[in-house]
Amino acid sequence: IWEKVGWFSEGIRHATAVEMRRERMHEKDTGQPIDRKTRKLTFRQAYTEFEKTHLPGLKERKTVMHWANEYVLPVFGNKAMNAITGLDLDRFKASMTEKGLSPQTIKHLLGLIRRVYRKATAWGLYFGPIPTMAITMPKVDAARLRWLTPEEAKEMLDWLWVQSLLWHDIVL
């Protein structure tokens, strides 16, 4: 079935057409019309449901709640979920970098946003684009290199000399 969405010159963007197609496909697959009220779903409402339903089973529950309340909800809490764009998330990422957060923490924050969107979609609360697909996650170098000081190396070799000459020679 062909349906006219609109022209680019009329303000219709690719994301709008994709969202409309997703809604039509959902209606076709389930046989139920989509509740258009979900278009007004704010990120805070989706996160509240995520917190009540999904978070109790996670061991990092308190950490996730801290991230949400401290960083994510003040920025995106009152925005409609379908109004948050990849550009908004890139700006969020830049502002978190300016605040001095590590790339790993920023990756966790963006991952939290992605999880809320995916759960809201899976639960049928939200039918729209997921903006985290439009951004690149920060690159994290988790390698931590530290060399032994000469004193630490001497202490370790002295201890190995007593424990095992073989391992002393291997380490040396």
Image (tube, helix red, strand yellow):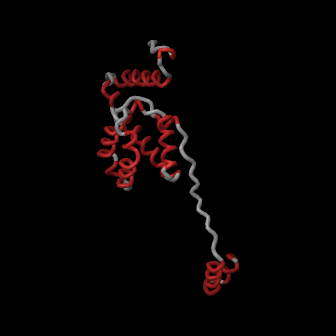
Residue located 45% across and 23% down the image:
16
In the image, is 49 to the left or to the right of 9? left
- Residue 59 location, quadrant: bottom left
Give the vertical position of 55 relative to 29 (above or below): below
Quadrant in which the C terminus appears:
bottom right
- Viewer-proximal residue among 2 and 62: 62
In the image, is residue 73 above or below residue 163?
above
Residue 2 in the image: above or below residue 104:
above
Residue 133 vs residue 94, the one in the foreground = 94
Q: Position of residue 13 (x, y in %)?
A: 49, 21
- All told, the count of numbered labels is 0
Residue at image position (38%, 25%) is 26
31 lies left or right of 130 = left
| Residue 154 % position (x, y) | 65, 82
Q: Residue at x 62, y 87 (%)?
A: 162
**In the depicted structure, whether residue 36 falls above or below residue 139:** above
Q: Residue at x 61, y 67 (%)?
A: 146
| Position of the N terminus by quadrant | top left
Q: Position of residue 40 (x, y in %)?
A: 33, 29
Residue 97 in the image: x percent, y percent? 51, 48
* The residue positioned farthest toward the front in the image shown: 98
